Amino acid sequence: MRFSLATIATAALVFSASAAPHGGIGKRGDNTDIEERGGKGAVRGRYADGTFLSGALGSRGATDPVKGLLPLSSPAAFLKVRKDDSDSSSDSSDSSDSDDEESNSDKEAEEEGDSSSDDSSSGDKETSSGSGDEESSSGSGDEESSSDSGSSDDQDSSSDSDSSSGSSPSGSSNSTGSSTPSSGSVASGTFPTAAGESTLSAPMEVTDFDGGMVKFGRGVSCTSGEGGGKDAVFNVADGGSLSNVIIGADQIEGVHCAGACTITNVWWEAVCEDALTFKGNGDGTVSGGGAKGAKDKVVQHNGIGSISISGFYVEDFGKLYRSCGNCKEQGERHVKIDGVKASGGSATLVGINSNFGDTATITNSCVTGTKVICQEFEGTSPGNEPQKISDGPSASCIYTEADVNAC
């Protein structure tokens, strides 16, 4: 076979290049300067004499051995090296960028997952602290139910426990009783627990007295026979006041006011003859408090004047208010009832003498189990019995159905 000189020269050049040592990955101080990109990806290098190296890494991180150098004077080889180098660098860069993007994407996904988890957890917390709690803490129906169902047995039980700790009749400023209802609200009807007990051998004469929710009694049997000032627990002076007191069941006449007086947050565990009697002329105010178990009247109005009853609770009674029908001195008496809660009235909520000009005004109250709201009588003189005239709303009995159904 015959070869031309050009063919032999080309073969020698190729053989020389393939026989040149390729070397390992270069380090500083070696005769090669090789940069690794992308792990087992492409490498590029330059020998100390200026020639470039391009190839693929072997399984141990080094290039496959190549025999001979690729001289810089070969244009074709130089272009191939630069092209391979560019492609290798691009592939490595793309691979690195792709890895970075995937890593960032995974990180963002984890962050979104954590955020979603936090949001979900927050939502669960909000749900768990929702309206249920709010519904369980609001229950005005429970208060009404407990107050309506409150029995004298419960009060007797608490009285027994209180009796072991005596208290000075001077009272205390530390009250454990129910506060006076705010203006415009209906009485809650929750009887308070006594802070102590005091049994009086005679009526306590007071001008201004705060009992500190101590329970006071007279140590006698509760009877409904007609009594007088000597049978009262408290005699309040004209213009005086009585507040934060519980009247026990061991008495007869409760509280007597000599004239104008202010009664605040006073509670009667039992009404014997009357709970509260306004004996003299003047205006009176009853705010808060309550009474139960009255066979007849709770508030007896004998003097001439106006009485205001607000935020008062009464259960199992005959009449809440009665203007005297046969007193020696007769004249106009007026009563205003607001925010009262009354249940179980056997006779009437209010009784007035319309022939003497009496009036009764009822607003914002809750009256249940009481057939007659306002009864008009024809007042008379001592020794005679007043006669019923009519009942229901009128010019003297001033109220509407809404006024007595604010429950």
Image: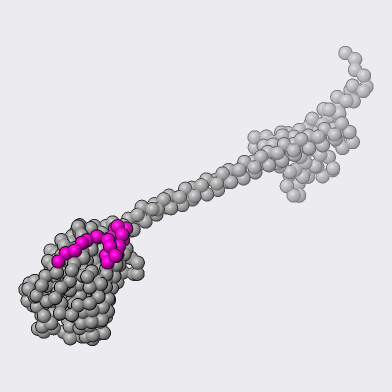
Q: Is residue 187 visible?
A: no
Tell me what residue is drawn at x 23 percent, y 63 percent: 374
Q: Position of residue 129 (x, y in %)?
A: 39, 54
Q: Is residue 128 above or below residue 8?
A: below
Tell me what residue is drawn at x 25 percent, y 71 percent: 358
Return the residue found at the far top: 1
Question: Which residue is nearer to you in this view: 163 or 179?
Answer: 179
Q: Position of residue 182 (x, y in %)?
A: 34, 69
Task: For the N terminus, give its image quadrant.
Answer: top right
Q: Is residue 83 magenta?
A: no
Q: Position of residue 242 (x, y in %)?
A: 24, 80
Q: Is residue 12 above or below residue 347?
A: above
Task: For the C terminus, give its image quadrant.
Answer: bottom left
Question: Which residue is nearer to you in this view: 319 or 27?
Answer: 319
Q: Is residue 128 visible?
A: yes
- Image-quadrant location for residue 5: top right
State which region is magenta: 387-405
Question: Which residue is nearer to you in this view: 363 or 383?
Answer: 383
Question: Which residue is nearer to you in this view: 236 or 84?
Answer: 236
What colouring style does the render use?
one colour
Tell me what residue is drawn at x 22 percent, y 77 percent: 331
Q: Is residue 388 magenta?
A: yes
- Image-quadrant location for residue 381: bottom left
- Number of marks drawn: 0
Tell me what residue is drawn at x 15 percent, y 79 percent: 328
- Image-quadrant location for residue 92: top right
